[in-house]
Structures are given as C-alpha cells and as structure tokens.
C-alpha cells in the first residue's frame, strides 16, 4: 500500500475521539475493532499467507487476558507486569503447541487448534483461581506515567498505537527473507525446501507471531473491559477471527483490519436490528456471517480488501514512473559472496549403480553415469523409463534402495533437500513451482535464501535491510542473466509458461549452484519459447555451468546436450554424444522410430564427450 492512504488513516484515527459530540459508543466500537485487528493481523500471516489454519487464536487472547487479570487483581501488580507475564506465557504455550500441532498438516492442524481452544475454554471455566465461569472482575486500568487509562477515549490511543505497530511489523515480516519463506508454506513447501528453506522453522515463527499478537490483544481487552470471563475466549470467537480474515483479506495486513471492522460493525448492527424485526434474541449474526463467508469464498477468494483497494487505485491512477533495477532502493547493495566453482571438465556428479524398487517394481536398475563441470547432460528415455525416479533420487526426494550418488566428493544419499541445496545443487520442477502472487524478483530472491541469514526478529523491526537489498540485487542480476530483467516487477503468475520456466532457471541460479538439475524444462512450451530456453541454457554452459536435464523433447535435447544417458524400463541402454545416440540401435528400437530423423546436429556442442560424427 502507498504511504499517503496510511497517513490519512492514521490522521483519521487520531481525530475521531476529538470530534465534539462523538458518541462514546463509537469509541468503544473502535476499541473492539482495534483489539480484534491485532488477532486478525496475526491470522493473515499465519493462515492467509502461510496456509496454516488456526481456529484457536481465542486461546492466546485468553492467556494474555487471564495472566494480566490474575496478576493485577490477586497479586495487585502493575498491568505492565501483567503484560510481561501474558506475553511470556503466550510465547511458552505457542512454542509447545507449535511443536505438537505444526507437525500435523492440512485439516489435522485445524482440528488440533479446535481441540486446544476447547481445552482452554474449559480450563478457564473450571479453575478456581481464575474465577471459574464468573471470571475475574475489578481489573485495574493500565496506567501511563501515573495517568490511568480509564476512559474509552484514553485507552483508544494505546490500542490503535499497538495495532499500527503490529501492522508495521507484519508488513516488514512479509516483505523479507523470512516473509518469502512464510509465503512459500501455502503452496510451495517442497520447492522452498529445495532452496534450503527450513520450512518447519518458519511455520513456528508464523505461529508464534500470531499467538503473541493475540496475547497482546487479550491484555488490552482485559484492561479495557476491566473484567474477563471464559465466554469471550471460546471456539466461536476463534471462528469469528477467522471470518474477519476471510472477509477482509488473506494476504494484506490492512485488509485484516478492514475485515475486523466489517464483521464487528455488522455484528453490532444485526444485534441491534434483528430483535426488533424478529422479536427474538437468536444469534442472527452467525447466520449472516456464515452466508457472507460463503459468498466471499465464492466471489472474492482473496477477501473484500483487494476490491476496495482496486476501486480506490482506479480513482487515483496516474501515469507513474516505471521502477527499474537501477532506480530501485537495493541497486547499490553489496554483491553476495560466491562459492568456489569446480574446474572445467572435472567430475561433478557421480551416479553409482543406483537402484530404486517400488515393491516388486524395479523403477531404476543399477544405473551409472556422471556429469562433468561445464557439460549439459541429458537423461532421456520413453515413458515410464525411470527418468523422473532417477531425478528424484538425485534431488533427495526419494531414498535410494541401493547404490550411491556423490557430488563434489560428498555423498548425496540420505541428504535432505536442504542439505543438497547447501552443497550447491539447484533444481527446477516438472510443473513450474513459482509463487504466483509474488513478484518475479521475489520468487528469484527465494532461490538465494541460503546466501544471507537475516532472521524474523530483525525483519519485524526492519533491521534486515542490508541483507534484503543484497538478496534482491542478486535476484535482479540473475534475471538479467537469463534475459528477464524487464519482467522483474510483474507477478510471477502473470507470465507465460515459457517465461515462468526461465524464471525457475533464474531462481535456481540465485542459489549460486555448481549443478543445475532441470526436470522436463521444455514441457508444454511453444517452439519459440523452447528456442529461448535453449539459448539461455546454452549461454549458461558457456559461462561454465553444469546442467543435468530430464527431457522428452528430442529436438531440444539433441541440439543442446554434450552427453546423453538413455534409459528404458529402468535400465541404462546407451550413453554417449547426441550423434552417437542417434545411431544407436537399442535406442532406436526403444523409441520404435520415435526419434525424429530430421534432427541433425549441425555443430557439435562445446565440450562434447566422445565421437560426434553424425550419420543422419
Ligand atoms: N511412487 C511410485 N510408486 C510405484 N511406482 C512408481 C512410483 N513412481 C514411479 N513408479 C513407476 O516407476 C516406473 C518409472 O517411472 P518414472 O516416472 O520414473 O518414469 P519416467 O521415465 O519419468 O516416465 P515419464 O517420462 O512418463 O515421466 C514406472 O513404471 C512408474 O509407474
């Protein structure tokens, strides 16, 4: 979001309580919106962006509220000590729950958060020292330099100061190295791991961040209401917070605040109007919220916020200046260090008698081959030959049944995807795995994740700018290298498939690899797109990059590679230069004439292995 709408928003917030005759009810309502916004900002990061659905945020609100309520009433301590206790307990609980629940995926995680919320609801309601179902009344107000925030107007400023601070940290977090990792959790976890992202670590960070904001909301709630009882921390409130996020925005912190405002205003209006219309005190708001959420999920998956911002930006749209790499804030950042590269023609990857069995099926049958530095090696074969399985064995996606894989003298077998990335092996995917809602530049910057170390805490406080600038500059350099600098600020999802595949190559290069593993890079590309990709790969080889590619497209492979390994029914049936392979009887038989007779290798690729003589 641009700066001026934020400044207008802050100005409005500042003047509302000062408007003469403003009803106290408005301020109370804004206080409630502010407190709920804190929980929703956390949910935007955890659930909307990170894809980890939690119904249990009301639990943490309860911890923050009860901790301070107990300490300030039973022990007559300062609410500020109550804040410290509340945050410490929230952190502790969140950390323990994260270790248990985040190992569960999909709906199991959601179910676990529901269970936790129910447990704590009954704990709050049955603990004698927490006042059982009556709760704790008589909580003192927060005092600021001896001035007690007794009135709704006075605590209002504290609440919204905390909300704005939370929004700032949320935006900082999402626009950082850690933020890119969190954004990959929803639809690109495996991809992120292959670039060295320790995804569990970032799940824990998102979970704890959301919990702390909820605990903070609880503390403010306890001292604003001056009483707490279990009913406000039950599962229905957990669901309501989720509704706020879904209706507001699944990706924007400001949208989260908007969602809290929409739901709480609606709730209030319905509670006011429904009893007069229907002469009953039934919870009509839940029915309306349910319908609203279903409608939003059908017609505005990302929430209502993008519609609001779209409307306003169409009103105020003007020409604008194009941001280029040179004019970007990171353009002068120091370059990232590079790993030492292997000597040309030295053996880089050795695949030694590898075998993979799926039950009785031998998918890969004692295959041997190697890749030398500065070569493009192709792994080809008819459908079901075992190419993808071999690729997955090398990239650590599948464990070996037997054999070994050695990269620059280090065994790859049993290494995790993260460890393989650290060694300098980068990969692309058969089905492109870019994060479509992220810019091309940020997608490529994710590839450089391992080359800087700024953590989430530094990102939250915006102390990570040097690291961030260096990562973005590196991403821009790699995009320039593959000829896509022009597209760096576009959303990755808006690019053609051909360009997306090249972005994947740029992202792999951002890791600073010695070896690129490309899984069917030409699949689904049009002729010209294939040519562009071939040019990029060939230029990379000229720069000394080594590439192993699994590919179906014979034309593409024959013109590009130095060396080919051919598989059929899991077994290696031939190996040699493209020219040799084109003449190989076994290969021709395996493909049943599938090789294109028209494919002629005009010029031997640089650094060919063996005899390149062509008998087309
Ligand atoms: N997870 C698995 N469980 C059981 N069998 C599998 C599994 N993965 C692959 N296979 C089998 O292993 C054999 C090799 O499959 P693989 O996908 O490696 O071949 P491929 O050469 O990549 O084929 P394609 O070109 O069609 O992608 C096939 O018979 C396949 O059915």
Image (spheres, rainbow, N blue to C red):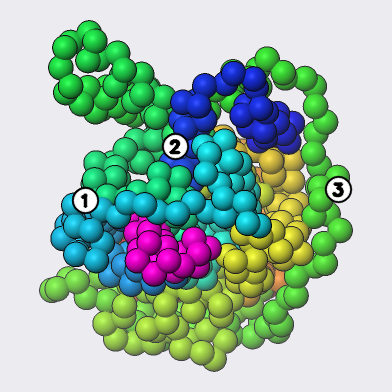
Q: On the image, numbered disc 1 is attached to which residue? A: 134
Check residue 77 for magenta coloring.
yes
State whether residue 299 is above or below residue 439. Answer: above
Give SS at disc 2: helix
Q: Nearest to the eye among marks 2 and 3: give it.
A: 2
Q: Looking at the image, tell me whether mark 1 or mark 2 is earlier in sequence order.
A: 2
Give SS at disc 1: helix
Q: Position of residue 328 (x, y in %)?
A: 81, 47
Q: Position of residue 2 (x, y in %)?
A: 71, 34
Q: Nearest to the eye among marks 1 and 2: give it.
A: 1
Q: On the image, numbered disc 3 is attached to which residue? A: 326
The kind of secondary structure the magenta stretch mainly shows is helix
Respond yes or no on whether mark 1 lies under 8 Å from ligand 1. Answer: no
Instruction: Determine whether, in the image, residue 8 is placed left or right of residue 110.
Output: right
State whether residue 47 is above or below residue 203. Answer: above
Where in the image, quadrant-wise, is ligand 1 located? bottom left
Q: Residues within 10 Å of mark 2 (few under 14, many from 20)?
A: many
Q: How many angstroms separate mark 2 from mark 3 (CA)?
A: 45 Å
**Magenta stretch bounds:** 62-87
| Mark sitting on residue 32 | 2
Q: Position of residue 418 (x, y in %)?
A: 48, 74
Residue located 36% across and 41% down the image: 241
Residue located 16% across and 60% down the image: 126
């Amino acid at each position: 979001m641009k700066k001026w709408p934020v400044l207008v928003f802050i100005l409005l917030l500042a003047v509302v309580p000062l408007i003469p005759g403003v009803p106290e009810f408005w301020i109370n309502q804004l206080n409630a919106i502010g407190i709920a916004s804190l929980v929703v900002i956390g949910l935007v990061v955890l659930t909307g962006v990170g894809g980890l659905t939690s119904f249990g945020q009301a639990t943490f609100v309860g911890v923050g509220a009860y901790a301070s309520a107990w300490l300030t009433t039973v022990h007559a301590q300062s609410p500020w000590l109550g804040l410290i206790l509340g945050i410490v307990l929230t952190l502790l609980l969140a950390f323990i729950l994260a270790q248990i629940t985040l190992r569960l995926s999909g709906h199991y995680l959601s179910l676990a958060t529901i269970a936790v919320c129910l447990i704590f609801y009954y704990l709050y309601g049955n603990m004698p020292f927490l006042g059982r179902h009556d709760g704790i009344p008589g909580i003192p107000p927060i005092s600021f330099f001896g001035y007690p925030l007794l009135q709704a107007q006075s605590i209002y400023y504290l609440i919204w100061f905390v909300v704005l601070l939370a929004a700032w940290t949320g935006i900082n977090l999402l626009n950082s190295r850690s933020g890119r990792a969190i954004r990959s959790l929803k639809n690109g976890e495996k991809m992120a791991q292959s670039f060295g992202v320790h995804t569990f670590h970032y799940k824990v960070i998102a979970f704890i961040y959301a919990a702390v904001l909820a605990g903070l909301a609880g503390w403010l709630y306890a001292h604003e209401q001056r009483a707490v009882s279990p009913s406000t921390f039950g599962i229905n409130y957990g669901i309501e917070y989720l509704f706020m996020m879904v209706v507001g925005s699944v990706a924007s912190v400001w949208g989260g605040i908007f969602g809290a405002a929409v739901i709480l205003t609606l709730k209030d209006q319905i509670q006011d109007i429904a009893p007069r219309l229907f002469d009953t005190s039934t919870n009509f708001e839940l029915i309306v919220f349910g319908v609203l959420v279903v409608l939003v999920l059908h017609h505005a998956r990302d929430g209502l916020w993008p519609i609001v911002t779209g409307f306003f930006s169409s009103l105020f749209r003007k020409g604008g200046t194009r941001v280029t790499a040179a004019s970007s804030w990171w353009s002068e950042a120091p370059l990232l260090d590079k790993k030492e590269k292997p000597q040309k023609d030295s053996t880089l990857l050795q695949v030694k008698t590898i075998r993979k069995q799926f039950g009785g099926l031998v998918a890969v049958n004692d295959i041997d081959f190697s890749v030398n530095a500065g070569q493009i090696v192709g792994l080809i074969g008819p459908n079901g030959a075992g190419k993808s399985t071999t690729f997955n064995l090398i990239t650590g996606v599948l464990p070996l049944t037997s054999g070994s894989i050695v990269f620059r003298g280090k065994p790859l077998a049993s290494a995790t995807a993260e460890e393989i990335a650290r060694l300098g092996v980068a990969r692309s995917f058969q089905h492109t795995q870019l994060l479509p809602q992220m810019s091309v530049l940020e997608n490529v910057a994710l590839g450089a994740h391992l080359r800087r170390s700024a953590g989430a805490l530094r990102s939250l406080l915006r102390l990570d700018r040097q690291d961030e600038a260096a990562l973005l500059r590196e991403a821009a350099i790699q995009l320039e290298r593959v000829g896509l600098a022009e597209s760096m600020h576009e959303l990755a999802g808006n690019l053609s498939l051909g360009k997306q595949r090249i972005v994947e190559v740029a992202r792999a290069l951002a890791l600073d690899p010695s070896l690129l593993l490309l899984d069917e890079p030409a699949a689904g590309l049009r002729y010209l797109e294939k040519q562009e990709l071939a040019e990029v790969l060939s230029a990379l080889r000229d720069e000394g990059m080594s590439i192993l590619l699994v590919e179906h497209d014979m034309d593409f492979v024959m013109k590009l590679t130095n060396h080919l390994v051919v598989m059929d029914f899991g077994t290696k049936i031939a190996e040699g230069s493209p020219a040799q392979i084109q003449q190989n009887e076994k290969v021709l038989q395996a493909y049943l004439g599938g090789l294109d007779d028209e494919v002629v290798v005009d010029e031997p690729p640089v650094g060919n292995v063996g005899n390149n003589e062509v008998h087309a």
